[in-house]
Amino acid sequence: MTSYTDKGPRPERGRFIQFDHVTYIVGNAKQAATYYCVHMGFKPLAYKGLETGSRDIVSHVVKQNKIIFEFQSQLNPAHTDMSEHLIRHGDGVKVVAFDVEDIEYIVETARKRGGKIVQEIREDRDDFGSVKTASIQTYGDTVHKLVDRRNYSGTFLPGYKKPELEIDDFLAKLPNIGLLHIDHVVGNQPDNQMEKVAQWYEKVLQFHRFWSVDDKQMHTEYSALRSIVMANYEETIKMPINEPAPAKRKSQIQEYVDYYGSAGVQHIALRTEDIISAISNLRARGMEFLKAPKTYYEMIREKLKNSPTKVAEDMAMLEKLSILIDYDDNGYLLQIFTKPMQDRPTLFLEVIQRRNHQGFGAGNFKTLFESIELEQERRGNL
């Protein structure tokens, strides 16, 4: 495991502030948005569809604190770009959007450095002001949308209106979750593509290497991976880039690439300050999570006896909920992973709590891999 302290020079201008939103392409946007509201604790935020004058695409947007997910489906059978994306990838992430300042500088710098601009800068307006957006192609069919909303006070973007999902009264009866913001978004790559993608983030977006790990540490008896985490200068945006490594059997990274059909977003980590409450309530709402073996908690209890780091949370509750623990001499993190959010074994979610620990659960990768491998074996894909 390597942590990088050299960020390189600060970009002359332009700033990546935070994750803005994530856009999924799905078969049925209304049902997907409702699923995330009922099971994950999101609330309807905005809508675009036939009633707003959008004849080709429908969008349902949901929000939980600073986390915004947009679900898009095609309305018109002739909208071939979206239908081809859905046929190839299934339900999945198309857009990872960043809130930025000085979008003009960022776009021109990306263009000069070889970035493919798939949407030039556009300014949209409504009664709440104006928003500038542009889009840059990244790995696979995934796009980074740049959003400059300094002059906008609306809830999402121009062209969207009050949500069509009228389920607030029902949602108010369900337990609160308390997911706060996106911690990181992980992209899986085919073998030998990770370094190329990491270099793209360095060159085109002026990100830097924040953390990395190789297959000497990240392996089980059957599979392995390598990972590099890329970050903006302020380190408010983290983009781990994974690739499979040669092993006895098929890695979960390779399984993802096989079923997604290319590189793509494997999982989205959502931050909380109270993971025990969050996971207890997510389970009460019907969410399914990977389970850690009992031996994991026997091992972690022994290791923590000799560590200066003390975990404040009740270990019995962490074990009951299958929440994993990673730590160093300065602090610890707690994390857990959902089962796939759709039928294809592709996208899943992570819930993470940090206590003075900025790693990515390297100490848990073996346990995570083994848990995923049990699911892979059930699917016949190990």
Image (cartoon, rainbow, N blue to C red):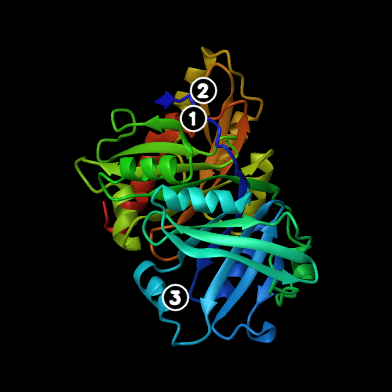
Crowding near the residue tagged with mark 2, few <14, some 14–19, many ≥20 C-alpha atoms within 10 Å: few
* Disc number placed over residue 297 in the picture, else none: 1
Question: For the residue marked with disc 2, what is the amino acid?
Answer: Arg
Q: Is residue 97 left or right of residue 37?
A: left
- Decide which of tag 2 and tag 3 comes sooner along the chain: 3
At mark 3, the secondary structure is helix
Residue 30 seen anywhere in this rendered image of the structure: no
The reply, left or right, for residue 34 in relation to residue 136 is right
Residue type indicated by callout 3:
Met
Residue 241's place in the image compared with 132, above or below, is above
Mark drawn on residue 270:
none
Name the residue rendered at 40%, 31% in the picture: 212
User: Is residue 222 visible from the viewing direction of this image?
Assistant: yes
Which residue is tagged 3? 82
Distance between the alpha carbons at the discs numbered 3 and 1: 45 Å
Marks 3,1: beta carbons within 8 A: no
Mark 2, residue position: 301
Residue at 75% from the left image edge and 75% from the top image edge: 166
**Image-quadrant location for residue 15:** top right
- Asked if residue 173 is positioned above or below residue 315 in the image, the reply reads below
* Nearer to me, 100 or 381: 100
